[in-house]
Amino acid sequence: AKVDDATRNHRGSSDLILRVYASETASEFLFQEDDGDSFAYARGAVARTKIEQQRTSERVRIVLNPTAGFYAGMPASRLVSLEVFAQDRKAQRVLVDGEVLPFENKSDGMILVPLGERARDARTTIDIELAAKDAGVARKFHGVLPGRISETRLRISAETFSMSRTMELT
């Protein structure tokens, strides 16, 4: 991933939106972050979170592993949402650590899963059960996601990784 002005020194919201392009080829990514203000990262003041994904014919599994490391000002938890693209398949049900969670099948093929507040020291397993190819499954989540002024998006697939910063006023 290239680090440029759009991804460097990200400040403001600590919310994280992960965009996952599900693939039958298992892949993982090590998400690294620091305080964005100093050169403390050169002395090891960084946090790293391994993110894994794999798609089968029945489901997409995404694992957020516990964060290792620490940097000054690092929050103990953050709001996390998933934007999952499972090619031409919609979600039928979403389980987070075995518990059913609301989700939304968007018209553009994205499956939106608001995970809510997640502790950095916890391992979180997300299983998205996929509907049959031609099933017209549509589920809406209830509630409102908090507005975001800024967010970090990660794009993960077996072939590529990219990160970008976007500004949204909602």
Image (cartoon, rainbow, N blue to C red):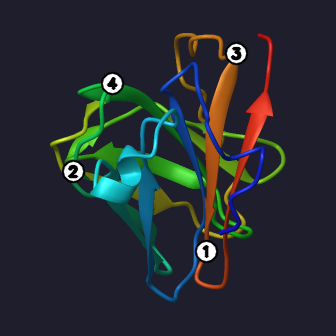
Residue 73, which numbered label?
4
The image quadrant of residue 77 is top left
- Is there any visible trace of residue 116 in the rendered image? no
Q: Which of these two is toward me, 4 or 139?
A: 4
Q: Position of residue 54 (x, y in %)?
A: 44, 76
**Residue receiving disc 3:** 149
Which residue is at a point 33% across and 50% down the rendered structure image? 46
**Neighbour class for label 4 at 10 Å: few (<14), some, many (≥20)?**
few
**Numbered disc in front, either 1 or 4:** 4
Disc 3 element:
loop
Q: Is residue 103 left or right of residue 161?
A: left
Q: Are marks 1 and 4 in contact (CB under 8 Å)?
A: no
* Residue underneath mark 2: 69
* Three-letter amino acid code at the position of disc 1: Ser
Residue corresponding to mark 1: 157
Position of 100 relative to 20 (above/below): above
Res 97 seen here = yes
